[in-house]
Each structure stands twice: as structure tokens, then as C-alpha cells.
Amino acid sequence: MKLISTVKEMQGMANEVRMHGKIISFVPTMGALHDGHLRLISEGRRRGDILVVSIFVNPIQFAPNEDLNKYPRNLDGDLEKIKDLGVDVVFNPITEEIYPEGFQTYVEVKVLQEYLCGLFRPEHFKGVATVVLKLFNIVKPHVALFGEKDYQQLKIIQRMVKDLNLEVEIKGFLIVRDKNGLALSSRNSYLSSDEMERAFSVSKALSEIKKEFDKGIRDTKTIIEAGGKTLREVGITNIDYLEICDPETLKRKELAEDGDLVAVGVRLGGARLIDNIRL
Ligand code: PAF
């Protein structure tokens, strides 16, 4: 497993690999790796000749009042976790390598960023799209793998790839959950044990909503109420959104249909938790 920290070396290696007709698979991360990442990495291994994992906490996707400074960082721990997963390269640049002085070019996926998390984190997806495009230009992958927990991020990246004619295949993978149903996230480490207990209700709320849908109820306000109740029962009242939306446009729906996305974003203690399921 080779550790690369400069853009020049990473691009050089990617060019070399491509020249030999080899397939590059890529898993971009911000580190603090959990089983969700490890699943993506194992999938990535099967999909490429050379597997690159990036570990870079991207400052421009955090608002000034967000958790950039306390975001968990543990490079040695991360390298230990992935050492037996067949990763060929870990790309771990410092911030100045990605954003040198004078940096001023951004990418925005205008409409998809206006829903769900985007309403509460206005600059977030601009920061994500920009860094992902940069990483694609640096790592030059044929295929890149993302988790569906960040569903809106996945849709935004797919749209960017289509709109900008990027030659990379984007693959989404199912959410990985703990035994209580909590979607794995690096930010779960912010939760106290009491908050962790209450956090289980986030996925429970989604299941309650699905149950109402499965009973035949289609009015989204009525169905959503079942999930809202589950959250309020454990004192989760700081709900950014809990809604049913079209899985492609992310527009909120009034009548639910098979395949619609149920998405939730809540704040609990020092963490912001997101999750989703499909009806
Ligand atoms: O999902 C993440 O970890 C990040 O948003 C990503 C895609 C690595 C970009 O910084």
C-alpha cells in the first residue's frame, strides 16, 4: 500500500497505470473509516486493477460554524484498518496541495443542491462537487464508489459527471448499519452513549414511515407523522427535514409511490445525522 501526498505524484502514477490499460477504481473518503467505508473499499477492490482510496478532510464543504476542526482524524488508525483490503494507493494530501494560494474555481450542481441537506448547509455541496471533480482529475479513476447514506451527494456527483461529460462510472452502495439499525457515519463518534441510544430512533422513524406506506397510505403528510412521532418520543426535536421525495429530482412529494426516497436529517447533541430508505 503506497502513500501518496502530492498531486503530481498521484497524477503521474494514474497516467502510467492508464497507459498500461489498467482500470483504476477509487473510493474518496474524509478518513475516520468505518465498516461502511470498508465495504466500499472491498467493492472497489473487485472493480479495478489498481484501487485508490483518498483520505482528505475537505475544508470547503464545511461552513464556518460546522465541525471542521473537530472532525475525527486518525491516519494511522485508518491505514491499519485497510491494510489487508488490497488497497494499492492511499492519496492523503495536505490542504494546501488541493487548495493552493489563489484557488478560486468551484463547481455547483445548481438544482439538486437546493433540497434536503442543501437547505441547511448552503455551501456544502458546492464544496463536495468541487473537491470530487478535483480528485477525479488527480486520481483519474474509471470507476468511483460512494455510499448511499449521503444520497443527495451521490445524486449530485452523478449529475455533475453527466453534465460535465466526465469519463468515470459512479457506483452507489447500500447503507451499512450497526446492529441497532443506526447508519454508520464518522460523526457517530460525537454521540454520548445516551445520545447513541436515542439515535437508533432515526432509522426506526424511517421504518415506521415505510410501514404506513406498506399499509396503503399514500398521503405523505400522514405517513411522515408516524416517523415524526418516533423521533419526538426520544426527544429528537431538532429535525432539519423528514420527507418523502422523488429519488431522482429530490423534490418533495405529496403522494408517495413505490421507490420514493424517505430522507431524514436531525441534530442530536454535537452530531448531525442523516439517513434514508426507499419505499
Ligand atoms: O462523503 C465524503 O466522505 C465526502 O463528502 C467526500 C465525497 C469524500 C468529499 O469530500
Image: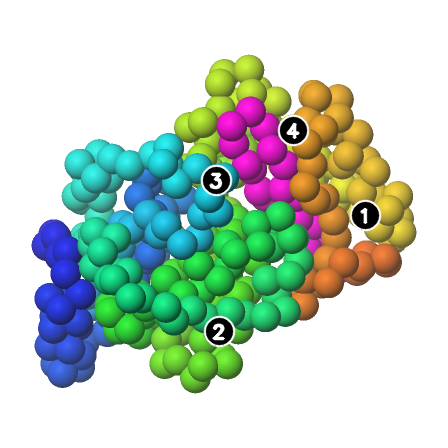
Q: Is residue 123 left or right of residue 189?
A: right
For badge 1, the amino acid type reads Phe
Mark toward the start of the polypeptide (2 vs 3):
3
Mark toward the start of the polypeptide (2 vs 4):
2
Mark toward the start of the polypeptide (1 vs 2):
2
Residue neighbourhood size for the residue with mark 2, other residues' Cα within 10 Å, grouped as few (<14), some (14–19), many (≥20): many
Q: Which one is in front in this view, the residue at disc 2 or the one at disc 3?
A: 3
Depth order, front residue of 24/154: 154
Which circle marks residue 160 in the picture? 2
SS assignment for the magenta stretch, majority = strand
Q: Residue furthest front?
A: 102
Residue at numbered disc 3: 66
Q: Is residue 262 magenta?
A: yes
Q: Which residues are magenta?
A: 258-279
Which circle marks residue 213 in the picture? 1
Picture quadrant of residue 273: top right
Which circle marks residue 270 in the picture? none
Residue neighbourhood size for the residue with mark 1, other residues' Cα within 10 Å, grouped as few (<14), some (14–19), many (≥20): many
Residue at numbered disc 4: 201
Q: CA distance from mark 2 to mark 3?
A: 25 Å
Q: CA distance from mark 1 to mark 4?
A: 18 Å
Q: CA distance from mark 2 to mark 4?
A: 33 Å
Q: Is residue 109 visible?
A: yes
For badge 4, the amino acid type reads Ser
Q: Which one is in front in this view, the residue at disc 1 or the one at disc 4?
A: 4
Label 1 element class: helix
Q: Position of residue 238 (x, y in %)?
A: 68, 32
